[in-house]
Image: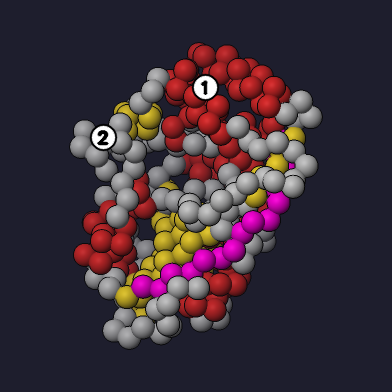
Amino acid sequence: MEAGWEWDETLFAGTAEYYRRGRLPYAPGLADALAEALRLDGRGRLIDVGCGPGTVALSLAHLFHEIVGVDPDGGMIARARRDAGDHGVAAKTRWVRARAEELPAGLGVFTVATFARSFHWMDRDRVAATIRDMLTPDGALVHICDLKTEPRTVDGLPHPAVPYVAIGELVEQHLGPVRRAGRGVLRHGTPGGEAEVYARAGFARCRRLVVPGGQALERTCDDVVAGVFSMSYSAPHLFGRRLGDFEADLRRLLWQASPSGRFSERLPSTEVFVRWKGPADPAPAADE
């Protein structure tokens, strides 16, 4: 993370109740792709680091004997625990409120560790090294993100695209041009270069998977508003007493963009990097 910024507990404060509705899901074939690549048979243990409201962990619950989700935000942990009950998997899941930097936290050894849109918020070298020590000898670390290099036009779909550029400009009008992050700011965004970090921790062998997206989605104004409030840089608490003014401006912008209150969008493909701890690569290294 850039110099001068420090994590604090308000980073995602108030976003948990918006997350599941507002964030686009991962590509629907993610669980099957991981089951094949990792030869999952329902007997291992998964730790999802920075689990949020349990989005990834719950989608993979059928592939493991036990699931442990770790997140520093109390709202996220509460939502994950509630959703685990709704999914009927409460008995095989455990939700721990802690920062990744506090691991191993007595949680034991795992077959698979997942990071989904979370690793960039952490002390990455420290966390990667710790997770490697928490994996079984043939265990794997899985880094999950949206594929950012594909076009996602809404040509041929029935509604306008979500006006993301205009939404970003509106956030800047209310919060200023420098990205907010908790009580601090990130002038240069979050860091990249994950491959180098994982290599330094000893994850030398990698297999890249692309789970295809492209499915057409229909989203309402409420869905888009939830998406805005699920983001760290536009979390509800950042607007203070002007939260109502911002939401009114946002909804006005959305209705101007689509008088029907409906938007079309295409689901992004999901990019997955599987990195094994063990001495022999159990799967081909070629891209898919």
Q: Earlier in the sequence, mark 1 or mark 2?
A: 2
Q: Is residue 56 visible?
A: no
Figure quadrant of residue 42: bottom right
Q: Quadrant of the N terminus?
A: top left
Q: Is residue 247 left or right of residue 95?
A: right
* Residue lying farthest to the front in this orientation: 155
Q: How many marks?
A: 2
Residue drawn 49% across the image and 24% down it: 169
How would you rate the neighbour count of disc 1 (Cα within 10 Å): few for under 14, some for 14-19, many for 20 or more? Answer: some
Q: Nearer the viewer, residue 115 or 192?
A: 192
Judge whether residue 115 is colored magenta.
Answer: no
Q: Mark 2 belongs to which amino acid?
A: Trp
Which structural element holds mark 1?
helix
Q: Is residue 241 visible?
A: yes
Measuring from the top left, give residue 174's x and y in whole percent: 47, 17
Q: Which mark is residue 240?
A: none
Q: Mark 1 belongs to which amino acid?
A: Leu
Give the residues drawn in magenta, as a range.
206-220
Residue drawn 56% across the image and 58% down it: 269
Q: Which mark is residue 5?
A: 2
Q: Nearer the viewer, residue 96 or 101?
A: 101
Question: What separation in Å lies between label 1 and label 2 (alpha carbons)?
Answer: 24 Å
Q: Which residue is identified by label 1?
A: 170
Residue drawn 66% across the image and 19% down it: 252
Measuring from the top left, give residue 77's x and y in whole percent: 50, 47
Which structural element holds mark 2?
loop
Figure quadrant of residue 22: top right
Q: Nearer the viewer, residue 161 or 44?
A: 161
Vertical placement of residue 78 versus 251, above or below:
below
